[in-house]
Image: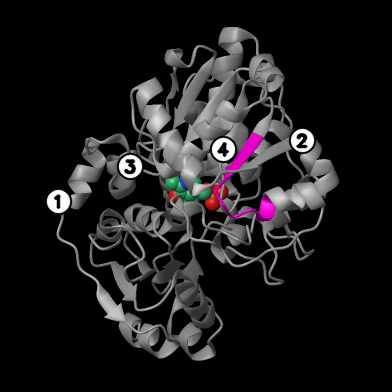
């Protein structure tokens, strides 16, 4: 399989697409064509790694990783991803729980897959690879956990001081020596600008072998499409109906993976994006004009994105807004609605949802009668509520028990280096090699 940039560069094979992350022309990598599947292709696949094996094999044609696919997948799917029925909803509804990985958010899946792939592409002669990652909270922890202790690879996490939750901060700072945690006295945008500046700096690039692990890497998207494949196949086998998915959306990586699975022939019905108050996608579908803007801070902070990168992929794969809006729904959810939704979820379903997941349950409640009854629905749970306990607990009026993964991480000692938001400070923090 060959990969091309959304802006035309290419072709490259999977290995180079994974290593580069972003194409030289600034575009995002997409496979030259998507394979297409019949449902019968999956008849013998009973677990997520087995589904993933069939779904992802064509993407590994021409890759050095082809013979390692089984091992990569068993490392990636080391935790369960159940679709739990919600009988209290009174209609066919399930919650796809993507948050049972080491850092309790769906980003663990993509990060684990990317780490499993990149570590197998390294050779002993190579200088250590330094993965730079700017994070507003969840990505950095998932990437650090995935690369923790891997020989020949180092992760440098940059996060904005005071703008991530205490538990998120702990998850960014509690790893082995090959993870360097930098608390930047600035904003997330500063962190991102520092990573870009470092990767464009000739002197630093001569001293280090840099790579990045942000959500535009195709290696984050491919494994995500497998849980949509698995959940839809299970539902379809049981009911004969294609489930609709409602997906909390920020940078559009998770939802893109679902749409990719549908394009490949998986039994997926309507797809609806639930965003927070950042309305860029909702406005695009309404006005047909793409107007990225600065992000607004909301309760669902991991979705505070004003310029969703993966829209470039979606437009290339499916089409412009007039086509997209026929195939994909979108609803922008306010902070007040998120709060009300967390409260209702707890009352009606008997469990807490995180602020991101609550955008999806709110969207489900807003479906009009016809949409609601014509389809079975799966809402996507992107993070464990205990990760956002300072928001969730006051709303539901009780504590959210810590899942064992988080408890284990929070018990570790944490350390970080505080730096100023400039390239010199980053350069001195990461040293000479
Ligand atoms: C990153 C994240 C999202 C948004 O996912 P995208 O792929 O950026 O659309 C939603 N919820 C949580 C908890 C996240 O960490």
Taking depth in this image into account, of 315 and 128 the one nearest to the observer is 315
> Are the two marked residues, 2 and 1, in contact with CB atoms closer than 8 angstroms?
no
Residue 280 inside the magenta-drawn segment: yes
Q: CA distance from mark 1 to mark 3?
A: 21 Å
Marks 2 and 4, how far apart at CA: 14 Å
Q: Which residue is mark 4?
A: 247
- What residue did someone put label 2 on? 327
Q: Residue at x 45, y 69 (%)?
A: 188
Specify whether 201 is left or right of 279: left
Q: Residues within 10 Å of mark 1 (few under 14, many from 20)?
A: few
User: Pointer 3 and pointer 4: residues touching (CB < 8 Å)?
Assistant: no
Residue 252: image location, x then y, percent: 61, 49
Mark 2 or mark 1: whose residue is earlier in sequence:
2
At x 47% / y 79%, what residue is drawn?
Answer: 194
Q: State which tag comes first along the sequence, 3 or 4.
A: 4
Element marked by disc 4: strand
Q: What's the CA distance linking mark 3 and mark 4?
A: 19 Å
Q: Does the CB distance between marks 1 and 3 fall below 8 Å?
A: no
Seen in the picture, residue 348 relative to 394 is either above or below; the reply is above
Q: Tell me if the residue at label 4 has its CB under 8 Å from ligand 1.
A: yes
**Magenta segment:** 272-281
Q: Badge 3 is on which residue?
A: 392
Left or right: 353 as drawn, with respect to 414: right
Distance Cα–Cα, label 4 vs label 1: 31 Å
Image label count? 4
- Please name the colour scheme applied to the rendered image: one colour
Q: Nearer the viewer, residue 164 or 154?
A: 164
User: How far apart are the alpha carbons under marks 2 and 1?
Assistant: 45 Å
């Amino acid at each position: 399989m060959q990969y091309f940039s959304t802006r035309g560069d290419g072709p490259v094979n999977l290995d180079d697409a994974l290593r580069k992350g972003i194409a030289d022309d600034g575009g995002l990598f997409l496979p030259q064509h998507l394979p297409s599947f019949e449902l019968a292709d999956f008849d013998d696949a009973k677990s997520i790694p087995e589904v993933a094996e069939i779904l992802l094999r064509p993407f590994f044609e021409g890759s050095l990783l082809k013979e390692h696919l089984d091992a990569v997948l068993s490392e990636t799917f080391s935790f369960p991803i159940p679709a739990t029925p919600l009988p209290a909803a009174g209609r066919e509804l399930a919650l796809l729980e993507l948050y049972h990985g080491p850092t309790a958010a769906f980003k663990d899946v993509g990060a684990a897959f990317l780490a499993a792939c990149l570590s197998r592409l390294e050779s002993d002669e190579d200088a250590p690879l330094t993965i730079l990652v700017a994070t507003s909270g969840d990505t950095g922890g998932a990437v650090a956990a995935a690369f923790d202790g891997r020989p020949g690879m180092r992760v440098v996490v940059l996060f904005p001081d005071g703008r991530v939750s205490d538990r998120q901060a702990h998850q960014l700072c509690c790893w082995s020596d090959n993870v360097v945690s930098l608390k930047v006295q600035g904003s997330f945008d500063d962190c991102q600008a520092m990573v870009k500046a470092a990767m464009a700096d000739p002197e630093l690039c001569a001293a280090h072998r840099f790579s990045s692990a942000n959500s535009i890497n195709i290696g984050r998207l491919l494994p995500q499409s497998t849980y949509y494949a698995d959940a839809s196949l299970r539902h379809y086998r049981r009911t004969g109906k294609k489930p609709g998915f409602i997906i909390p959306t920020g940078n559009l990586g998770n939802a893109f993976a679902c749409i990719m699975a549908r394009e490949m022939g998986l039994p997926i019905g309507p797809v609806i994006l639930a965003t927070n108050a950042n309305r860029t996608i909702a406005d695009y579908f309404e006005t047909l004009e793409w107007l990225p803007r600065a992000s607004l801070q909301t309760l669902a902070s991991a979705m505070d994105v004003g310029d969703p990168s993966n829209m470039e992929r979606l437009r290339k794969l499916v089409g412009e807004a007039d086509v997209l809006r026929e195939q994909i729904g979108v609803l922008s959810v306010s902070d007040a609605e998120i709060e009300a939704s967390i409260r209702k979820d707890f009352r009606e379903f008997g469990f807490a949802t995180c602020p991101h997941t609550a955008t999806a349950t709110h969207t489900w409640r807003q479906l009009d009668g016809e949409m609601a009854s014509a389809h079975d629905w799966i809402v996507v749970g992107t993070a464990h509520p205990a990760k956002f306990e300072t928001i969730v607990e006051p709303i539901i009026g009780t504590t959210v028990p810590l899942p064992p993964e988080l408890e284990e991480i929070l018990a570790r000692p944490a350390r970080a280096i505080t730096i100023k938001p400039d390239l010199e400070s980053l350069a001195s923090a990461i040293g000479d090699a």
